[in-house]
Image: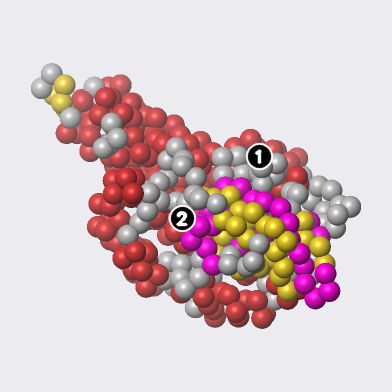
Amino acid sequence: MDNSELDDILTAVREFVREKVVPLETQVEDEDAFPESIIKESAEMGLFGWALPEEYGGLGLNAEQDALLAMELGYTTPSFRSLFGTNNGIAGQVLVNYGTDDQKSEWLPRLASGEVVASFALTESEAGSDPSGLRTKAVRDGDDYIINGSKRFITNAEASDVLIVFARTDPNATGSKGISVFLVPTKSEGVTVGPHDHKMGQAGAWASEIFFDDVRVPAANLIGGEEEKGFYAAMASLNKGRLHIAAICVGQSIRILDESVRFAAEAKQGGEPIARFQLVQAMLADIYTDVAAAKALVLSAAQRWDAETDRKLGPSSAKLFASEALARIADKGVQIQGGMGYMRESAVERFYRHARLFRIYEGTSEVQRVVVAKQLLKGAHKPQFNL
């Protein structure tokens, strides 16, 4: 996609987000759901398939273009992006990178159009940021597999049509070995999706527990047609997902910056705008510096992803910095607004609660630090700095 086409898309999304989604934020917060009209219009704009290949009906955005779009989507409640994030990201990318031609042809066009919603069913109670503790099992039975186990915190599970399920096919394997991945229609007999969880923030983004009780799926639903591709498929999707989440954090940070500058210029103490107070100015300066640094880091990492020179160090360092920066920014946003920032009707109060999850999902900050350190010890940083 050339720059003019991308600019048109970014402009359309920016207008849609700011004119139609932002005004709905308190309604979404109260109802824990988006109006169907917003979901339908999002599908018509191609938002269910921006990262999926053009040959399957997607927009085919590369990593840098994806990051720029994510920054626009991140300007509002992050649950908006979650409506279609699994189709484009962790679930859809498993099919893009590892699916057979038949699997891609059957599912990707439906994901791109929004006809189908996919969920990425990896996390379990004892297998979160590190999936090596995964216990869900899939046993071969003739031309089928029988799946038993459970998953936790699965985004869009309640709204999903198909699940990308990770399970052990080798009962004797441990750690990252013996894990395979399957396409499981959500309405399959034996699949039970629990009610969505009540969370600290990000209302409107539904996450649920899923149970698999002797769920029978044909061997043709084994993604890639081979066993033991699951761990690698999960890591490839998560690495790109971390880059996308980092860009969403930048969008969230830009929104808080806007809210903070506006409030500081308009709110008065002693008859003077609080923007005249140097300690308020210092907080604004710190917010801007973190936003600018996070944006630069994310775009640099995205460019290296597209160049295929770095697909581990960049995403993890970007996700680590951008999510931690967002936490600092959200805290300062509340502090600038004082008592008003603590009220539920305040945007910064909501974004303060939204922000907390970004340091946890798709790999905690602690996991990102481990990944970054391991990559540094392998010398992965040397080309970047010409060492």
Count of marks, rendered view: 2
Residue 224 position in % (x across, y down): 73, 71
**Relative to 121, is 378 on the left or the right?**
right
The dot on residue 82 is 2
- Residue at image position (19%, 33%) is 265
**In the displayed structure, would residue 189 be above or below residue 335?**
below
Q: Residue furthest top?
A: 270
**Would residue 269 be counted in the magenta stretch?**
no
- Residue at image position (82%, 67%) is 140
Mark 1 secondary-structure assignment = helix
Mark 1 vs 2, N-terminal side:
2
Q: Main secondary structure of the magenta part?
A: strand
Residue 284 position in % (x across, y down): 32, 32
**Would residue 148 be counted in the magenta stretch?**
yes
Mark 1, residue position = 367
**In the displayed structure, would residue 337 be above or below residue 186?**
above
Which segment did they paint magenta? Answer: 141-169
**Label 1 vs label 2, nearer the camera:** 2
**Pick the front one: 103 or 163:** 163
**Pick the front one: 124 or 268:** 124
**In the displayed structure, would residue 305 be above or below residue 106?**
above
- Would residue 376 be visible to someone looking at this image? no
Residue 191 position in % (x across, y down): 63, 61
Query: What is the crowding at mark 2: few (fewer than 14 residues within 10 Å), some, or many (at least 20)?
Result: some
**Pick the front one: 43 or 163:** 163
- Of the 4 image quadrants, the one containing the C terminus is top right
Q: Amino acid at mark 2?
A: Ser
Q: Amino acid at mark 1?
A: Val
